[in-house]
Image (cartoon, helix red, strand yellow):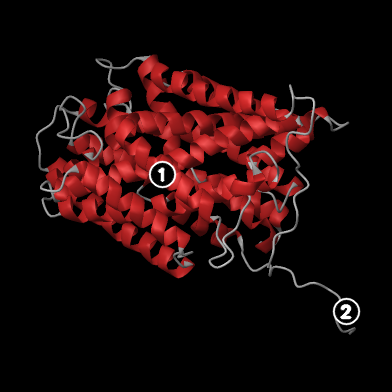
C-alpha cells in the first residue's frame, strides 16, 4: 500500500452518518421550538395551532428537498445566497443574501424579547428594559470572546429538554383526562373549529409557524464531514423536518387541549409557560426556566450566525469589506459584526414585539427559501437535458407554498420587510452604478484552518 503524499492537505473527516445528522438538526432547531411561539400562533391562527404547524411542515419538506439537492452541487457553501447567485443571477443572489441578513439579525432580537419577557415574569421587580439590556450585553460579550457551547453540551441540553417535554405530556394527559369535556369535538378543535376557522387566519398562523423549523438548512453546512453526503444530507434534512413537525404538533395539540383557544392568555409571548403551569403547577417554573435556557442558547448562536453571514457578504464585497469583512486577530471572530448585530437586536427589542419580530424574520426566511427552490428548479430541471418530474415538482411546490405563506404575513410585517428589501436593492444599485458592475464575488477565498 502506498504511503500518502506529503504534499496532500488534510481534509475534514467523513465521520457523520444519517442519524448523527438528524440528531444535529433536532438539536439546532430545538425540540421546544413551538413553545416560544405558541401564544402568537394561537392568536393569529384563531386556535388552529396544530393545523398551522402541519401545513408549515409540508412547505418546509419541499424546501428541504431543494436544500438537500443544492448541497450536492455546492457541498462547502450551504448558503441560499450562493445557490441563487451562481445558478440564477448574482443580483438575485444579493437580494437573497439581503433577505437572509434580515432573517439572521431578527433571530437574536426575538430571543432577547422572549427571555427578557420571561425573566420579567420570574422577577417582576426588574423592568423588561433592564433585562433586555442585560441579555444583549451578555450575548455580545460572550460572542466577542469567542465562547461557544460544545456539541456535548448541546446534546445534554437537548436531552434535558426531552425530559421536560415528556413530563409535560404526562401532566397534560392527567389534566385533560381529569376534566369534563363535550365529547369528540373537544379533541378535534385544535385541528378544526368551525366556530373560528378562516382560511386567512390559518395561512396567517402558518406564516408564523415556519419559525418552528428555522435552522434545518444548517445540516447542509456539514456536507464535507458526512459519509455518503449525496444521499444522507438530503435524507437528514427531510427527516429532521418530519421529526420536528411531528413532535411540535403533539406539543401544541396537548397545550391547546389544556388551554382552549377560547380563553385569553395572561401574556401571549410566554403563553406556553402558563399552559404548563395549569397542567401541573411546578411546570410553570420548570418549563419557563427550560425555555429561557433554550432561547438564551439560540440567541447567542443566532447573533454569531448573523455576524458570520455579514462577514461572508463583506468578504464577498456585497457589503463594505473594511468593516464587515474584518476579523479580530485575537479572538478570531468578526467582532465588528457581533457588536453591530448586538446593537441592532437591542434597539429592536424596544421597538418591536415578539409577534411582529417573528413575522419579519419569516419575511426574510421565506424569500430565501423561495430562492433556494428556484435555484434547484433551474439547476435540475431547466438546465438538465432529460426532464424528470421529480426534479420539477418539489421546487415548484416549495416555491408556491412559501410564496402563499409570504403573502399571508401581516401588512405591518410586509411593509417593514419591503422597506428593508428596498434599502438593500438601493444599496446594490448604488454600489454597482445601476447594477452595471460586479455586485458579489462568489469565488470566495478558502477558509483558514
Q: Which mark is residue 343?
A: 1
Left or right: 240 in relation to 372: left
Left or right: 353 in relation to 79: left
Residue at image point 71% right, 39% down: 83
Q: Is residue 235 visible?
A: no
Residue at image point 66% right, 46% down: 321
The quadrant in which residue 178 appears is top left
Identify which residue, 11 or 346, lies in the foreground: 346
Residue 196 pos. (x, y %)? 26, 17
Residue at image point 18% right, 46% down: 120
Location of residue 101 with respect to 42 vertically, above or below? below
**Could you tell me how far apart the alpha carbons at marks 1 and 2 are, in whole angstroms?**
49 Å
Location of residue 205 with respect to 102 vertically, above or below? above
Identify which residue, 307 or 324, lies in the foreground: 324
Circle 1 crowding by C-alpha within 10 Å: few under 14, some 14–19, many from 20: some
Identify which residue, 186 or 35, lies in the foreground: 35
Q: Quadrant of the N terminus?
A: bottom right
Q: Disc 1 vs disc 2: Cβ atoms closer than 8 Å?
A: no
Q: Nearer the viewer, mark 1 or mark 2?
A: 1
Left or right: 83 in relation to 264: right
Q: Which mark is residue 5?
A: 2
Q: Which of the two discs, 1 and 2, labels the residue nearer the N terminus?
A: 2
The quadrant in which residue 200 appears is top left
Q: Quadrant of the C terminus?
A: bottom right
Secondary element at tag 2: loop
Residue at image point 28% right, 16% down: 194
Q: Which mark is residue 218?
A: none
Amino acid at each position: 500500500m502506498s504511503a500518502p503524499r506529503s504534499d496532500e492537505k488534510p481534509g475534514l473527516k467523513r465521520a457523520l452518518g444519517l442519524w448523527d445528522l438528524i440528531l444535529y438538526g433536532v438539536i439546532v432547531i430545538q425540540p421546544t421550538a413551538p413553545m416560544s411561539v405558541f401564544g402568537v400562533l394561537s392568536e393569529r391562527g384563531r386556535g388552529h395551532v396544530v393545523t398551522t404547524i402541519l401545513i408549515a411542515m409540508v412547505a418546509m419538506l419541499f424546501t428541504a428537498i431543494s436544500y438537500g439537492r443544492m448541497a450536492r452541487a455546492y457541498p462547502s457553501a450551504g448558503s441560499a445566497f450562493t445557490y441563487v447567485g451562481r445558478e440564477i443571477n448574482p443580483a438575485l443572489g444579493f437580494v437573497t443574501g439581503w433577505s437572509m441578513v434580515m432573517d439572521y439579525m431578527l433571530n437574536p432580537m426575538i430571543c432577547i424579547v422572549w427571555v427578557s419577557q420571561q425573566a420579567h415574569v420570574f422577577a417582576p421587580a426588574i423592568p423588561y428594559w433592564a433585562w433586555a439590556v442585560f441579555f444583549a450585553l451578555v450575548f455580545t460579550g460572550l460572542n466577542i470572546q469567542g465562547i461557544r457551547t460544545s456539541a456535548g453540551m448541546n446534546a445534554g441540553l437537548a436531552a434535558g429538554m426531552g425530559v421536560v417535554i415528556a413530563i409535560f405530556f404526562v401532566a397534560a394527559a392527567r389534566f385533560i383526562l381529569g376534566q369534563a369535556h363535550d365529547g369528540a369535538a373537544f379533541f378535534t378543535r385544535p385541528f378544526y373549529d368551525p366556530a373560528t376557522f378562516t382560511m386567512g387566519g390559518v395561512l396567517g398562523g402558518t406564516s408564523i409557524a415556519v419559525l418552528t423549523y428555522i435552522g434545518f438548512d444548517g445540516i447542509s453546512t456539514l456536507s464535507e464531514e458526512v459519509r455518503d453526503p449525496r444521499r444522507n444530507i438530503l435524507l437528514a434534512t427531510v427527516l429532521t423536518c418530519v421529526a420536528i413537525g411531528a413532535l411540535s404538533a403533539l406539543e401544541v395539540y396537548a397545550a391547546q387541549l389544556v388551554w382552549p383557544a377560547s380563553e385569553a392568555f395572561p401574556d401571549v409571548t410566554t403563553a406556553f409557560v402558563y399552559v404548563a403551569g395549569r397542567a401541573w403547577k411546578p411546570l410553570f417554573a420548570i418549563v419557563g426556566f427550560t425555555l429561557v435556557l433554550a432561547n438564551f442558547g439560540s440567541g447567542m448562536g443566532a447573533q454569531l450566525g448573523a455576524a458570520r453571514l455579514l462577514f461572508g457578504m463583506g468578504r464577498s464585497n456585497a457589503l463594505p469589506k473594511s468593516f464587515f469583512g474584518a476579523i479580530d486577530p485575537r479572538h478570531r471572530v468578526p467582532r465588528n459584526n457581533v457588536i453591530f448585530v448586538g446593537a441592532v437586536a437591542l434597539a429592536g427589542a424596544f421597538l418591536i414585539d415578539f409577534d411582529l419580530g417573528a413575522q419579519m424574520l419569516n419575511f426574510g426566511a421565506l424569500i430565501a427559501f423561495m430562492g433556494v427552490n428556484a435555484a434547484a428548479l433551474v439547476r435540475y430541471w431547466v438546465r438538465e437535458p432529460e426532464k424528470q418530474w421529480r426534479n420539477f415538482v418539489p421546487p415548484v411546490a416549495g416555491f408556491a407554498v412559501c410564496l402563499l405563506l409570504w403573502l399571508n404575513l401581516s401588512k405591518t410585517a410586509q411593509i417593514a420587510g419591503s422597506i428593508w428589501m428596498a434599502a438593500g436593492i438601493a444599496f446594490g444599485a448604488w454600489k454597482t452604478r445601476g447594477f452595471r458592475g460586479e455586485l458579489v464575488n462568489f469565488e470566495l477565498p478558502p477558509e483558514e484552518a
